[in-house]
Every structure is written in C-alpha cells, then in structure tokens.
Amino acid sequence: MTKLSVNINKIATLRNSRGGIIPDVVKAAVDVQLFGADGVTVHPRPDERHITRKDVHNIRPVIKTEFNIEGYPSREFIDLVKSVRPHQVTLVPDPPEAITSSSGWDTIAHFSFLQEVISEFKESGIRTSIFIDPVEEMISKAVETDTDRVELYTEPYATGYAKDREKAVAPFVAAANLANKLGMKVNAGHDLNLENLAYFNECIPFLKEVSIGHALIADALYLGLERTVASYKALLKKN
Ligand SMILES: CC(=O)[C@@H](O)[C@H](O)COP(=O)(O)O
Ligand SMILES: NCC(=O)COP(=O)(O)O
C-alpha cells in the first residue's frame, strides 16, 4: 500500500498568522500519526513563513512513523537536517522567494552539487529523495547522483486531471517505470487531493509514498483532521 506522509506546513501557516502557539504544530504531528498517517513531512523554508527551524526540532521527538524534511540544500538546511536526523530528506530546487515548489531539479545542470549533498546525507544515514519532473533525461541523470528515491512533482498531473486524466498521468507512469528500472524508489507530491489521488495511485507503478499537505489541511477545515487523514488513506489502498 502506498504510504501517506502528511505535510503540516499549513498548520504552521495558520499559527504564524497571529504569532502565537495556536494551532499547536507538534500536536498536529502527533495527531496525524494517531489518525493513520505513515509519516510527517515539513518544509522549513528560509523565511520561516510556516515551519520554523524550532518546529523541526520540536517535532522530531514525537515522530513514531517517518519524518521527511523537504527543502533546498543550503548549508543551513543541511546542518538542520543532519542535527535532527529524519528518516528521509527530500531536496527541492526552490529559490528562497518561491511562493511554493514549481519544478523538479535539473539533474544535469546541478549534477555535481546534488551528488555532493546526497553523499553527505547518506553518510549521516538519512534516506535521500530528489524532487523531479517526469522527464526521461532528468530521471536517467538522477540515478547517477546515487539518490535513494525520486519524488515526482505532480502539479502538472493535478492541473491536467480534470481535462484529460489519461493524458495527464501518462508521463508519470513512464517516469515511475524508468525510475524503478534504474533502481530508484518512487515518491510523489504536490497538489494531490481527494479528487485526483485515487486515479494517480491506481495508475502509477512502484509508488512508495505520497506527501500531501495543502489540499489535505484545507479539507480538514470542513471534515476534521481525523476523518480527512482516514479519507486520504482509504484512497491509497491498492485495489
Ligand atoms: C515539495 C513540495 O511540493 C511541497 O513541499 C511544497 O513545496 C509545499 O511547500 P508550501 O507548503 O510552502 O507550498
Ligand atoms: N512533497 C509534496 C508535499 O509535501 C506537499 O505538497 P502539497 O500537497 O502541499 O502541494
């Protein structure tokens, strides 16, 4: 069964909007695991617009499933990740001013940088994943960085889903097959939601994990966090 890692960035967005401690991000991390999540994902951005470095340290001790930390591998990010030793680190190419993640790595142009950073994390015993577009050349080069996994950037799938889901999912099926053939495990994430998740999970071979945040937290405003996590998990049961 594909694992669900709940990204709790947007819990921190709400908390930061008034500068207090409500909602409690650590409690959210505990609860999503109690409600069935297979992991917790956070993305501590340089401006700390949502998840702060302090949050990362506070969440680590309550992880009973898996902890996945996403971010651009600046020196500060690398040192933060190595200090808390999550189960997985997911490298994204986001510049500091990015509104959100909007592409995968150019693994050809940034090959040496990625190879160096991945080696440093693996030496610390941390599983590595790199955010990637479903482009054959990028995936073929990714394997040479020695990354454990790739995370397919699924915004183009989500955008194209309503118009033509078969066309939207096709590049991701090919990408997952290629990554598997090259020996890399396959994660996916960005803009997945209750509407588009089941079809993606049904079509994508070898899918290990999805990380979902924005839509899931928005759904929880209506359904409640427990029912929402259970609803996403139910969509990931392979039929
Ligand atoms: C890598 C990815 O797709 C998500 O982690 C996304 O970057 C979420 O970041 P925000 O919550 O800041 O939009
Ligand atoms: N890696 C994707 C992630 O963690 C959450 O992305 P989104 O669901 O907030 O778009």
Image (cartoon, rainbow, N blue to C red):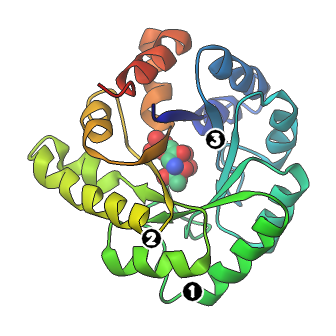
Q: Position of residue 146 (x, y in %)?
A: 62, 74
Closer to us: 22 or 197: 197
Using the numbered discs, state the Cα–Cα distance from disc 1 to disc 2 in whole angstroms. 17 Å
Name the kind of residue labelled 3 in the image.
Thr
**Residue 212, above or below 22:** below
Circle 3 or circle 2, nearest the eye: 2
The secondary structure type at the circle numbered 3 is: strand
Q: Disc 3 designates what residue? A: 41
Q: Does any atom of ligand 2 lie closer than 8 Å to the CB of label 3?
A: yes
Q: Disc 2 designates what residue? A: 182
Q: Quadrant of the N terminus?
A: top left
Q: Quadrant of residue 92?
A: bottom right
Mark 3 closeness class: few <14, some 14–19, many ≥20 residues within 10 Å: many
Using the numbered discs, state the Cα–Cα distance from disc 1 to disc 3 in whole angstroms. 25 Å
Who's the residue at 70% across and 72% down the image?
118
Circle 1 or circle 2, nearest the eye: 2
Residue lying furthest left in this view?
164
Using the numbered discs, state the Cα–Cα distance from disc 3 to disc 2 in whole angstroms. 26 Å
The secondary structure type at the circle numbered 2 is: loop
Mark 1 closeness class: few <14, some 14–19, many ≥20 residues within 10 Å: some
- Which sits earlier in the primary sequence, circle 1 or circle 2? 1
Who's the residue at 29% across and 57% down the image?
172
Q: Does any atom of ligand 1 lie closer than 8 Å to the CB of label 1?
A: no
- Which sits earlier in the primary sequence, circle 3 or circle 2? 3
Q: Disc 1 designates what residue? A: 111
